[in-house]
Amino acid sequence: MSSLAEVVHRHGDDYLAQYGHQLLPSQRRTLNDIVHCRTAACGGHIYHCADCNETHYQYHSCKNRHCPQCQHQQGQDWLERQEALRLPVPYFMVTFTLPAELHRIAMLNQKVVYNILFRASAAALQKLARDPRYVGGKIGMVGVLHTWGRNLSYHPHVHYLVPAGGVSADGRTWLEVKNNFLVPVKALSVLYRAKFRDALKQTDLFDQVPASVWQRDWVTHCQPVGRGEGALRYLAPYVFRVAISNRRILKVTDEHVTFRYRASDTGRWHTSRVTGVEFLRRFLQHVLPKGFVKVRYYGLFSPGMRQRLSVVRLMLALLIGLVEPEEVQDDSDSAGFEVRCPQCGEVMRWVQRFDPYSRSPPAC
């Protein structure tokens, strides 16, 4: 099966020869991590089978957030941590995008523009939600930054998961949304554009933006996505999905990479064939700056408000007569981690751990 690591193996040197002088440290590190993920370079463990005398090397993952091999388990771990935030109500997914005219500026000034994107969109949604014609109170928001379209194009946008309601100004009442409607997206778009413009004016980037950008419609979208835990599971792939998964890479040759993608307008699958260097160029434009926080929490879900969530749950219990039972997980009978022999299927005995960046598996 083809993989991103194979693309880097075959075409990484050619890419570095053309674009290496432009690479950010985070992009260079991502290339290195992907090509060494689950190899001896990441370290690991040695196991031995007493039945058939087989020796097995279990290598560590690179844990880079842009590596397609490392994200599934992190997604499951994130879901477990979000249980403390979950409210037993319907949720909405609200999406904010950047106009195409701002893409190049965003790509060259990622931290500045992405931070403004978060601040402007969150402020616009919270302000409109406080309007008594809509929610009329403080809402909770979990926001996730994405930068890609399905064909690896550059398309920065933020998804927010938002409960269908909020808390009144005095903090005593849960306010349900009316008729399964959160806020009007047309008004939200206008407010978001204005707040983004005002924030960008505080930087030296504002003069690089064509004046027509502030006259056109900015795309926002709002849709219901289910209740409670189901809504969090809906969001989890957005949190830990990388620009492309290995299963979408169909073929890698010395010249080209062929991958598939689903068209957003029709839902149909298409294939695209590009040179290996072009494929890596598209992929690396989605590598985030080191230390950039791509998941952010606002309103009721902000760190300073989380201690109030138990009060919010009590409001909901009184409102809809729902009291959720405590779920206690008993791990006393859970089986320990086992490695099965690839030859005979028996449980293997752990021998030793070896450190990362070994040039080859150590001898037993």
Image (tube, rainbow, N blue to C red):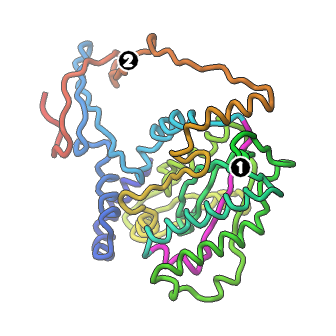
Q: Which structural element holds mark 2?
A: loop
Number of marks: 2
The quarter holding residue 293 reads bottom left
Determine the CA span between mark 2 and mark 1. 49 Å
Q: Quadrant of the C terminus?
A: top left
Q: Which residue carries the number 1 mark?
A: 169
Q: Residue furthest front?
A: 170
Residue where numbered disc 2 is placed: 336
User: How far across and how far down the image is residue 279, in percent?
Assistant: 44, 66
Does residue 98 belong to the magenta stretch?
yes
* Residue farthest left in this picture: 363
Instruction: Indicate the amino acid at tag 1.
Output: Ala
Which residue lies most toward the right here? 179
**Residue kind at label 2, given as amino acid type:** Gly
Residue that appears at 33% across and 59% down:
31
Q: Which residues are magenta?
A: 89-107
Q: Quadrant of residue 110?
A: bottom left
| 243 horizontally vs 284: left or right | right
x and y, in percent, of residue 168 in the image: 73, 46
Query: 19 and 320: which one is in front?
Result: 320
The residue that appears at 50% across and 39% down in the rendered structure is 78
Q: Nearer the viewer, residue 286 or 190?
A: 190
Residue 305 lies, with reference to residue 182, above or below; the image says above
